[in-house]
Each structure stands twice: as structure tokens, then as C-alpha cells.
Amino acid sequence: MPSEEEIFKTIQETLVEALGVDEDEVTEDATLVADLGAESIDFLDIVFRLEKAFDIKIPREELFPQDILTNAAYVEDGKLNEAGLAELKKRMPFADLDKFAENPKIQEFGNILTVGDMVRFVASKVA
Amino acid sequence: MRWFWLDKFEVFQSGVKAQAIKCITLAEDHMHDHFPFYPVMPHSLVLEGIAQTSGLLICEYYKYKQKVVLAKINKAVFHCLAFPGDTLVYKATVERIDENGTVSSASAYIRKPNGEEVLFAEVEMMHAILDDSYSDKKQFSTRDYRNLMVNMKVYEVGVEADGVTRLAEPEEFKNLD
């Protein structure tokens, strides 16, 4: 089983190739959308590369549970409600959602995923 | 639709792989400007031809119900130049298909008169499947698709994903006059 450092290194290489960013930009704290400029189609590319690199299967909704954002039971006035946040935390245990939870605007959801979150997600899949 | 950058399919396995050819001729307008007195097939149009090869493969897989657009070129490496009189062979393989998009890899070759194929380009690309927010937009008509696929010999050479069963035209095609 690869160490977290090895997983980080592979994810770093993946993001450099998929997003055309420099290696030193891919830090643990960097967010994929805001800092590294990932667009929606890039996530498909990244997921495909990670599946090949780690020989795992990554259902898209596991890494990006966007269905929560379109579920009327979880959204009020463009923000996730308590139940929505609870569901998001349950579905994304690898992500640090504290900052997002302070003002859970749907439009900010794309900005929450960091490189560190991806490392923890992959670590949970290869464990 | 006249933006055709391939001439016909030689291999077509539904949702799996396709092989198409493009015969380069000096009659194509762009060859006179690219470049004056030195006509070279633009690599950007080769990419378009490869995108059409894998794009039509994906369109057929979804039985022309989805809107498929080229979204990203992950890699494009060209090894040489192609000139009028050359036949390009595009070989595309679908690596992954899901409801959001596809990843394809492809190689292009120059087919020599003796049948030998020389590696010309290596490409990886992604096509996006447009979501419901584009449902009011029509990409191509059923008639356009039928004419395109029939003229490009898809249903003469095509097989289903199992590689054996002959590919049949969808019912919508048969109902057109």
C-alpha cells in the first residue's frame, strides 16, 4: 500500500499533466478549482488518470457528490441547509468542510476540494 | 454539415474502437495557404479528423441521442508532416465512457502505397456529453447523422461491441425517406 507521501507525489504528477500547472503550485492546501484552475471536464480527466495510476475505481459521485446540491431537501436560498451539510460531511469524510460550512453557498462548492482532500480520498480507496 | 475531416471508416466497433481514413488532396483550399508553394496538411485539422473519428464512435454508442462535443486535448504529439497525395489513417480507441464524457486515445499513420503505415501522430482527447441544460439545442438532425454515417460506410464495416454482430442502422434512420 503506498504511503500518503507517495500518493501525494502521484497526485501531484497527475495534476501537473491534467491541468498544465507547475509542480510547486500543487500543494496540499491548493484548491483544484480556485487555485489550480480545474474545470468540470478536467475532473473526468483527473479521475481517469487516478484510476489508472492507483488501479482503483472512483465513482464520480464519491469524489464530487453533486447530487446533494440539486436535491431540494438539502438546499434553501442557494445554500445547503443543516441536513445537506450533514449529508455532505457523511459523503465526504476526506474533505475539510469547516470553512465551507460557515457560509455553505452552492456556488462555492466547487472551490472546497483541495489536493490534500484528494490524497486522503485516494488513501481511503487503496487501504 | 460540411466540416468533414475524414473520408470513410474502415473499422467501427461500437463504443470500442474505430479506424478512419483521410485522403489529402491539393484541391483543398487550405493547402494553398498552408503554405504557399509548400502545401502541408495542418496538424489542427488532423486533430479535428481524429476528434470526428472518436466523436462519431461515441455518438453511435449513444444511438445519436446525446450531444457529444470535443472538450479537451490531453496530448498531441506529431512526428512528421503529411502532404497532398498522402492517406492518413486514424485509429481511435475509447478508454472510458461515462454519463459526463469520454476519454479516447488515438494514433494517426501515413499509409504508404505498399500498405506500410508510418506513425504520424499520437493523441489523447476527451469528449463531453452535454447535460440537460442543452436539451433545447439540436446538434445535428437525424437525417444529417444518417447521411454522414452511411456515406462514411459505418454500416458496411461496423460491428457491435462484441466484435462479431453486424452493426444495424437504428430504427430512426430506417424511417427516413
Image (spheres, rainbow, N blue to C red):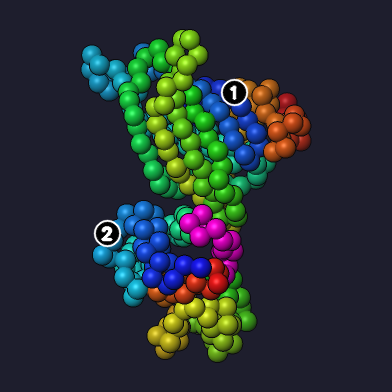
Q: Which residue is nearer to you in this view: A6 or A32?
A: A6
Residue A118 lies, in percent from the top left, at: 45, 70
Residue A81 lies, in percent from the top left, at: 54, 87
Q: Nearer the viewer, mark 2 or mark 1?
A: 2
User: Which numbered circle lies on residue B43?
Assistant: none
Q: Which residue is nearer to you in this view: B15 or A74?
A: B15
**Dot 2: within a 10 Å radius of its alpha carbon, few (fewer than 14), some, or many (20 or more) residues?**
few
Q: Which residue is nearer to you in this view: B108 or B153?
A: B108
Residue pictured at 46% horizontal, 32% vertical: B107
* Displayed quadrant of residue B165: top right
Residue B26 as seen in the image, left or right of residue B23: left
User: Which numbered circle lies on residue A22?
Assistant: 2
Q: Is residue A44 visible?
A: no
Q: Which residue is nearer to you in this view: B75 or B67?
A: B75
Residue pictured at 37% horizontal, 64% vertical: A9
User: Which numbered circle lies on residue B10?
Assistant: 1
Q: Dot 1 falls on which chain? A: B
Residue A43 lies, in percent from the top left, at: 46, 60
Which residue is situated farthest in the front direction here? A1
Asked whether the residues under the numbered discs 2 and 1 touch, taking CB atoms below 8 Å apart as contact, a structural biologist would say no
Q: Amino acid at mark 2?
A: Asp
* Displayed quadrant of residue A10: bottom left
Instruction: State whether residue A31 is above or below residue B25.
Output: below
Q: Is residue B7 visible?
A: yes
Q: What segment is highlighted magenta in the picture? A: A51-62
Residue B156 as seen in the image, left or right of residue B79: right
Task: Tell me the distance, in whole angstroms, between the alpha carbons under discs 2 and 1.
Answer: 41 Å
Residue pictured at 34% horizontal, 57% vertical: A16
Q: Amino acid at mark 1?
A: Glu
Image quarter in which the C terminus of chain A is found: bottom right
Instruction: State whether residue A62 is above or below residue A77.
Output: above
The magenta stretch spans residue B133: no
